[in-house]
Structure formats: structure tokens, C-alpha cells
Amino acid sequence: MRGRLIFPFLAELFRLDTRSQAMADPQGPGPFEGAMDPDFKEPVLVDPDDDGIGERIRHELPAIRIPCQIETKSFEEQRLFPSGNSPRSRLDLVFHFIELERRLLVDEVSGDALIRPGDRLGGIYDRANNLVQTIRMPPGLFVTEARPIGFGLHRRHPRRNLLLVTFQSRQLATGRTN
């Protein structure tokens, strides 16, 4: 017995495809630098249309829907900056490791969950696959933490059973005035 989720919904996840991201060259002709920033470990910004605004180039794996329990911390909370509004959202989703294992989202060698920082939440669905809430892009909601919780609920064969995943929006505006 490993427990179960309370009032489950389905989370639609788009996992960041770091393998093809690292191979792609969004800058076009010239020296290959890769689409991932080597220092910050996130997609680089490029300006393909020369409008002075860098766009994030993301390579994502196909969407998957996973049962989860939802804990809303804040949703589109207004934050005003001199350069505009940058709403802040934060959702904590709780996934059961049984569901992750069924979908091959647990690394067999390390035991790590394959939901990782940089993955994006696309929407929330009910158990009948009806849309409950779509997540606007931008700002989007991205994984900032994926932490195993709930260890040892079975006496004879204690195992972990839950993964707490924090999704947060990315800031759209800047507080700088120069």
C-alpha cells in the first residue's frame, strides 16, 4: 500500500527536450554555440526577426497528462513595475510515484523522477480529460523544484510515494528604469 492522491486532476506537462536543445543552433550560420546557456542551463534568447526582443527557443517533448493533486499558492497575482505588469503565479502539484513509474518518468538507474526544472505546465484537466484551466504562455508556469516526499508508508517494504513539484511563472517586466 503506497497511498493515493486526494481529489486528483490531470496535469498536462511539456518536458524540456535538453538533448535536441543542446544540438540545435538557433543563431543560424556561424560558430555553433548551442541552444542551451552553459552557465544558466536554460534556453538562450535569440532575435531571429531583428526587432530587438530576444525570444526563448525551446524544444519540448510531446505533452503528457499525469494525475496530480493541486495546491494553489498564488495565481496571476498582480506585480506592477515601471515597464509593465508582471503577474506572479505559483502552483504546487503532487504526483504519485506509481503514476510516474507507469509513464516511464522515473530513471531506472538513479531512481530520479524525470520531471525536472525547466519543464512547463500546459494546463489542468479533470479525470474525464475536460479542460479545467489553461496556462497562458507567456508568462507560463515552469518547474522550479521537483522534490520526493512521503517516504516509508508501507511497513514491510517502505518506499517513497509522492513527488512535490513547484511551478512558477517567469517575470515578464523589469524593475529597472534606465
Image (cartoon, helix red, strand yellow):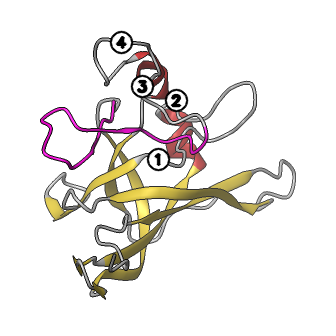
Q: Earlier in the sequence, mark 2 or mark 4?
A: 4
**What residue is drawn where x is 28% and y is 78%?**
87
Visible residue check, residue 107: yes
Q: Quadrant of the N terminus?
A: bottom right
Q: Which residue is mark 2?
A: 104
Mark nearer the N terminus (2 vs 1): 2
Helix, strand or loop at label 2? It is loop
- Residue placed under numbered mark 4 in the picture: 30
Drawn side of residue 135 relative to residue 15, left or right = left
x, y percent for residue 34? 45, 22
Left or right of 145, for residue 17: left
Dot 2 alpha-carbon crowd within 10 angstroms: few under 14, some 14 to 19, many 20 or more: few
User: Label 2, label 1: how many angstroms apart (C-alpha)?
Assistant: 19 Å
Q: Is residue 34 above or below residue 51?
A: above
What number is the disc on residue 118?
Answer: 1
- Is residue 117 shown above or below 76? above
- Measure the alpha-carbon separation of dots 2 and 3: 21 Å
Q: Is residue 103 magenta?
A: no
Spatial separation of the CA atoms under disc 2 and disc 4: 38 Å
Sequence-earlier tag: 4 or 1 = 4
Q: Position of residue 49 (x, y in %)?
A: 12, 35
What element does badge 1 sit on? Answer: loop
Q: Which residue is mark 3?
A: 21
Bounds of the magenta span?
Answer: 39-59
